[in-house]
Image (cartoon, rainbow, N blue to C red):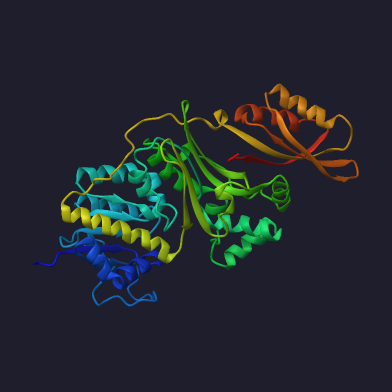
Amino acid sequence: MVEQVINVGLLGLGTVGRGVYRILKNNSTGIEQKVGARIEIKKILVRDLAKNRGIVPEEGLLTTNISDIVDNAEIDLVVEVMGGINPALEYSLSALRRGKSLVTANKDMVALHGRELFEAAEANCCDVLFEASVAGGIPIIRPLKECLAANRIEQVIGIINGTTNYMLTRMSKEGLDFHQVLKEAQDLGYAEADPSADVEGFDAARKLTILSSIAFNTRIALDQVYVEGITGITAEDIAYASELNYVIKLLGIAKESAEGIEVRVHPALLPKSHPLAAVSDVYNAIFIRGDAVGDVMFYGRGAGEMPTASAVVGDVMNAARNLLKKVPGIISCTCFEEKPVKPMSATLTKYYVRLNVVDKPGVLAGIALIFGNHEVSLSSVLQRHTTGNAAEIVLVTHEVLEGNFQDAIKLIKELPTVHQITSIIRTEGD
């Protein structure tokens, strides 16, 4: 019997690329038995041939010329782990247009240019697989596309950024402030020197774009996602949340209703009883509700060399099986509907509001009157700190239309008895 071989071109040999190389080498026997063919790395694209990467690939594997991969007739499958948009997108499209299936871990490229990638794959009868683009080693793309495909997905709520989850965990456990934990996260390598993609919510928004498009079978654009980061969260907010029996998490939230899809990333108070509330440190978790399956949750490491490489190699194995059966493209784009996306003003949620006000009778009544006039009702009120003639009040609302709440807040800010609205944080999961 002639041994079957699937040849792979690897674009990038950074953190994830090294993990892919190691798994394909170290687990080659088991992978061959599970796939029915030997998977070999034929070429690896790098920027610098002389760079020390902690591994020494075989002689002749490294190249700085992309044509050695995309124009190589012996290469069946391209694995993109370079990151960023360009030249990763250009190289990926070139591979697809030459009939080579693509595996990528690139959330930015998939979120912003998924349509182009899928159209190129369909036109050339090949795969685009991207399990590692969301939540690292946690299997979530394939479960949504296959295992949960019989369901009408009602909601997807996830902790999908490990950096911010680590920071909020440290703030909760140690009472530290935002800037302290950010420096700690940077020192540990969890946060970049420029942490804005994480702490401003942009990284989570890209991942949510991908998840919601798959879950609701409609293409969600990144600019349709409401995004708010954690830079305004304080140790005081976390302490108040705990007193109210909540934790604060940065959540990616996607829900479908009769009015359309809502997609948003923001910090939220989450009941301590919610399954996501116990997800701490750099771990990720995604909570899904389907009409048939009910509630399910996927949990694990959302980043890192080996967890992410695990997902990449899993996709490589699936693409290899499809190539052997000559049926690539069987789980291509699932965005076959066009559903409306609700504006943020049309969403329903509850709110935590912290205010610094004049400490005198009638102040709370004036605030409550404005809320009442805008159909915002209060479920709880706390008053804790009084200094001189100032008092701190914490309010939690019942579920309210976002537009009504924001209109009320504008008027409350103008009250002469309100010094400052210190914090506004939504609540989820009650």
The residue at the point 32 percent across, 34 percent down is 336
Q: Please state the horizontal and vertical placement of residue 281, each as a whole percent of the image.
A: 57, 60
Residue sitting nearer the eye, 35 or 391:
35
Q: Is residue 91 visible?
A: no
Residue 256 x %, y %:
46, 33
On screen, residue 128 versus residue 175, left or right, reads left
**Residue at 32% across, 45% down:** 146
Q: Quadrant of residue 372?
A: top right
Residue drawn at the location 81% of the way across and 28% of the way down: 365
Quadrant (top left, top right, bottom left, bottom right) of the N terminus: bottom left
Left or right of 415, for residue 96: left
341 is higher (above) or lower (below) than 191: above
Residue placed furthest toward the right: 388
Q: Which residue corresponds to the image point at 68% horizontal and 23% vertical from the top-left?
A: 374
- Residue at far left of view: 1
Q: Nearer the viewer, residue 123 or 297?
A: 297
Please count the marks in the image.
0
**Is 61 displayed left or right of 164 in the figure?**
left
Q: Is residue 28 above or below residue 385?
A: below
Q: Quadrant of residue 16?
A: bottom left
Q: Quadrant of the C terminus?
A: top right
Place of residue 397 in the rendered image (x, y in percent of width and height, measured from the top left): 69, 33
Report x, y in % for residue 50: 34, 76
Q: Residue furthest top?
A: 373
* Residue 357 seen in the current view: yes
